[in-house]
Amino acid sequence: MAKMRKTQVKRKTRETDILVKLNIDGKGKSKIKTGIAFLDHMLELFAKHGLFDLEIKAKGDLQVDIHHTNEDIGICLGQGFNKALGTKKGIRRFGDKTVPMDEALARVVIDISGRPFLNSDWQVRSPESVEGYNLEYARQFLQAMINNFPITVNISVLASGPDMHHLLEAIFKAFARSLDEATQLDPRIKGVPSTKGRL
């Protein structure tokens, strides 16, 4: 049986104090407490649909705003995935999932490339925020995670409507399922899936 790919990341600054525990080969269990209720909900969905076991404890300067906490959690989660994957030998590397949530439809395509890049097409008609969280906060969270992984992510909003909650949920679920696919081990792949010999 393959070794479980799991890790722990701690980050403490003058603005935040964060602990992330991650098991890529989990069952979708989560225990999330960030102080940002809507982000908690999105990360619970992320763990559930990516089949990642994920524990996050975060304290931040929420009296200022949610920016520092939101971004630093993304940093820690990206570092966690990068550490847990190690050499990345045997992984499928690519993931592509499209997920609906009622009127919303999001597609996420991932390449565990070693190159941090986020491309998003988020021209939407939905309200600007839900429970204080919005698309820009989601973009900042994902950018921080991607920079610290590092991976290439293309996100397309294929349909949207009046409910920002539905759109954000579709994005986080598609991201989780695509990342699950990309991190899966394929017994046919020997070594690192790159002609360069490393990712």
Image (cartoon, rainbow, N blue to C red):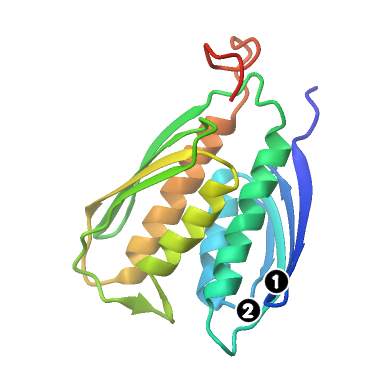
How far across and down, in percent of the image, does residue 108 sit? 38, 43
Q: Quadrant of the N terminus?
A: top right
Q: Secondary structure at mark 1?
A: strand
Q: Which residue is mark 2?
A: 35
195 relative to 117, above or below: above
Going by the numbered disc 1, the residue's amino acid type is Ala
Q: Are marks 2 and 1 in contact (CB under 8 Å)?
A: yes
Where does label 1 land, which residue?
58
Q: Is residue 10 left or right of residue 195?
A: right
How busy is the neighbourhood of tag 2: few (under 14 within 10 Å), some, or many (20 plus)? some
Identified at 67% across, 48% down, the residue is 79
**Which of 84/102 is in front?**
84
Q: Nearer the viewer, residue 46 or 59?
A: 59
Residue 84 position by quadrant: top right
Residue 64, percent across and down? 56, 87
Crowd around label 1: few <14 · some 14–19 · many ≥20 (10 Å):
many
Give residue 48's position: percent from left, percent from top.
Answer: 58, 52
- The residue at the point 56 percent across, 17 percent down is 193
Above/below status of 114 relative to 12:
above
In the visual, does 179 lie left or right of 7? Answer: left
Which three-letter amino acid code belongs to the residue tagged 2? Answer: Gly
Q: Residue at x 64, y 73 (%)?
A: 34
Residue 53 drawn at (x, y percent): 69, 50
Marks 2/1: CA distance? 7 Å
